[in-house]
Amino acid sequence: MRLAPRWPVPLALLLTAVACKDQGAPGQGGAGAGGGGAVIGAALSLTGPAAVYGSQQRAGIQAAVEEVAQGGGPKLTVLIEDDSSTKEQGITVFQKFINRDKVSAIIGPTLSNTASAADPLAQQAKVPVLAISNTAATGITDIGDHIWRDSLTEAQVIPGAFKKAQEKLGFKTAVVLYGNDDVFTKAGYDVMQKALADQGVKVVGTQTFAKPDRDYNAQLTALIAAKPDVLVVSALADNAASIVSQARQRGWTGPILGGNGFNSPAFIKNAGGAAEGVMVGTSWNSLSQEAANQKFLAAMKKAGVNPDQFSAQAWTGVIILAEAVKQSGGKTGREDINAGLAKVKDLDTPLGRFSFTPGRDAQHEPNVQQVKDGKFQIVQ
Amino acid sequence: MGQQILNGVFVGSIYALFAVGYTLVFGVLDILNLAHAAVFMLSAFIALLLVDAGLSLLVALPAAVLAAGLIGIVLERVAFRPLRDRADSNISGLISSLAMATVFEAIALQIFGPDTSRFPQGTFPDRTLQIGDATASLLQLCIVGVSVVLMAALTLLLGRTRLGRHIRAVAESPRAARILGVDVDRAIAMAFFLSSALGGAAGVLFGLAFNSISPDVGRSVELKGLAVIILGGMGSVPGAVAAGFALGLIEVFTVAHLGSSFRDAVSFVVLFLVLIARPRGLFGRAAAREA
């Protein structure tokens, strides 16, 4: 057999040319360097189970970029991509941001589950990531020194929220239902279990479900049969709405405590009347009169979006990155922004006065809210 | 305990209704129609569209069931009839039905998007009833009721009517049926109509019961439906009914006592054990009749 000599040569040349072109743009610079300002990638769950959060985050980011531009801050260009609420798509989007778009920093991804898979890529490429909604206590910022977050962890929110709820409701026994196939809902469960134990509440029943499940009657029947004082649920908003509706249908009239997954207007909309009285810890106080929060609320109203914790955290993420660019003297390289983030301190945001902990986690005061008349109301 | 039995009967009735249609086509054609779960999903969406358009559920449910039946006829024309006279029609039919399932799912994805859709509040009166120590919502009772009525109607139709006789004759032997003057093509088309209409009814009821419909909703019943018809005996309608309720109950007790991670595992272990002891399934026909 004769080797075909003609094709491999031009093909190899072509490949080399493509490879060289790719290396021509150095990864460190940040594509925005030429046009001025920083290019930031945002990986958000615009479809899939976490879409209810992703659309809110997109609204928060877009409004904040406008706000920064009007306020004379550093120029930011945000590229928004859908991570489909999955690890696989999250990784693909991160690779695109890091290698093709050469972004200076990444915001997101929406779910802790996705972050646990995608963030290591950014850490390896030394691209700073600012998480705006990852709340799993471990496995996010401890991935490395380029991973930051402005969202309080479940471990920071839940103990305080449960304590306040217990003061109001005086429960002594509880049952817990949680999703055991998701990093966030599982981590939420671990924190809840510890918080309940610390408060001397006896857990008289525990049940699990998986994200694609739609029928929770078997679990709820078993839990309600244990006659607890309170039902505790760690779930994403989509599952949470179905769980709360089915619990009310099964005759549960007692209080329900939720995790961070409940913090969405979509939860109330989908659960309808069944959501009344549900209590949940939150990192955003919608009633705050601080100027930074009022500015955020006005921008959301202008955009026609119902503001929630997720849009507030997304807005804050953009404000923090703008501050980081300012702190690094307007330089937009990946390491410049990472160094700038470390200098962010007592920044006025809708979440309150914001600083990072030494472990690059968020630090500010959490709150508790309860559904009343179809709306989240802050419990004073 | 009483409540869990009720939960099991409730979800079992949907499995049974879904599987009855599944097994009917298998009984007639000896072909698995893998697009059955896609029809289940489309029908739920059609009902949702009609309810959103302001129609009462009393109109939307029968209309969606009828639409599902018509989709079944289209399915038969496109995916099965052109292949019927081929020597390998069992395998090629299986694959073309899988292709149709993918097409249906893609259509739903285009029109309705990947997110969960829900029936508006108040589509069905929100009322609960006390039965012994168990509570049941009116919706759950209606779902069990509608399923049982539809399954009984199918049994009567197959056993007592001319169309039923034709379908059974074709199931026995298409060639003999044709010699005896049965319009085989029509009987098969009608079997598909009935099968898909029942699958569609199950889809609407499932959508109402758990109030969440998405293009991948068929996956929740696809494998379970297959387990039900194998357990009941391939092609046996009473077998599918019995196995549907049995697997519903097994699933509920598994979740409550072993945890949701075992939701499907126990059902399939039971299936496995039954098949070892009785390879034909619970109500399967004896081999001698097929010879």
Image (cartoon, coloured by chain):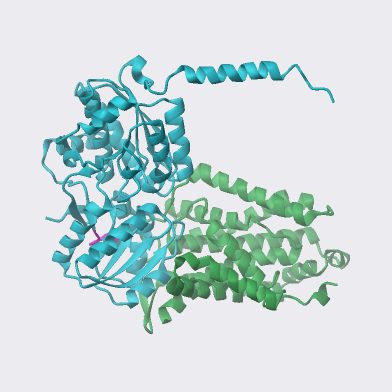
Chain colours: A cyan, B green
Residue A250 versus residue A178 in the image, above or below? below
Residue B270 visible: yes
Residue B240 visible: no
Residue B74 versus residue A248: which sits nearer the camera?
A248
Horizontal relation, residue A118 to residue A227: left or right: right
Q: Which residues are magenta?
A: A275-279
Residue B64 versus residue B271: which sits nearer the camera?
B271
Residue A199 versus residue A44 in the image, above or below? below
Outermost residue toward the right?
Answer: B179
- Quadrant placement of the N terminus of chain B: bottom left
- Quadrant placement of the C terminus of chain B: bottom right
Residue at 43% x, 36% y is A121
- Residue A84, horizontal then vertical, whole percent: 45, 43
Give residue A322's quadrant in the image.
top left
Horizontal relation, residue B24 to residue A63: left or right: right
Residue at 36% x, 57% y is A186
Residue B55 versus residue A93: which sits nearer the camera?
A93
- Residue B25, horizontal then vertical, whole percent: 70, 63
- Residue B215, horizontal then vertical, whole percent: 52, 50
Residue A132 versus residue A366 in the image, above or below? above
Q: Is residue A278 magenta?
A: yes
Residue B4 versus residue A314: which sits nearer the camera?
A314
Horizontal relation, residue B56 to residue A376: left or right: right
Q: Specify the principal SS of the magenta part.
A: loop
- Residue A130, horizontal then vertical, whole percent: 31, 37
Q: Is residue A151 magenta?
A: no
